[in-house]
Image: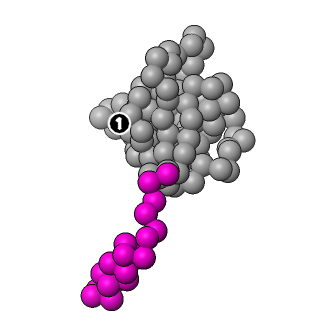
């Protein structure tokens, strides 16, 4: 067996697709997607023609609100390419983003006191 005949991966690895091929060589990543960003799409949004398989999967996953890191895990992509794909979906008006539990933060003195008490008990 010569060096050119050797495979550096095994048959169980499945098809090898480079990351830049999955994102179409694009590299401009929106920086406003934080780790706590929640992604969701409006009911009734349908995937238009021309979306990549990853974008279609992201749109399906966003039927229920999902956090950015969880989306990346389900897509099998690092955070950067996931941000890129989601930025394109948001620019197309297919998804929207928000913070965690947006509008449901309770910063009343009682809640803050319980939090402080819990931290002190650690």
Q: Quadrant of the C terminus?
A: bottom left
Residue bounds of the magenta highlight? 103-122
Which residue sits at x=57%, y=19%? 51
Q: Is residue 47 left or right of residue 117?
A: right
Closer to the camera in the image, 27 or 55: 55
x, y percent for residue 34: 57, 54
The local crowd at label 1, few if under 14, some if 14 to 19, many if 20 or more residues have their Cα within 10 Å, is few
Q: Is residue 42 among what the camera can see?
A: yes
In the figure, 85 relative to 43: above or below?
below
Say if the magenta span includes residue 39: no
In the figure, 8 relative to 21: above or below?
below
Judged from this view, the residue extending furthest toward the right is 28
Q: Which residue is mark 1?
A: 13
Q: What secondary structure is found at the residue carrying circle 1?
A: helix
Say if the magenta span includes residue 115: yes
x, y percent for residue 4: 50, 35
Residue 12 in which image quadrant: top left
């Amino acid at each position: 067996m010569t060096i050119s005949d050797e495979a550096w991966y095994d048959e169980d690895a499945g098809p090898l697709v480079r990351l830049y091929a999955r994102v179409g060589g694009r590299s401009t990543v929106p920086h406003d997607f934080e780790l706590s960003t929640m992604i969701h799409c409006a009911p009734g949004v349908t995937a238009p023609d021309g979306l990549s398989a990853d974008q279609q999967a992201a749109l399906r996953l966003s039927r229920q609100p999902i956090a950015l890191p969880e989306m990346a895990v389900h897509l099998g992509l690092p955070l950067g390419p996931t941000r890129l794909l989601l930025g394109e979906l948001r620019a197309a008006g297919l998804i929207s983003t928000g913070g965690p539990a947006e509008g449901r933060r309770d910063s009343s003195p009682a809640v803050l006191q319980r939090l402080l008490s819990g931290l002190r008990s650690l």
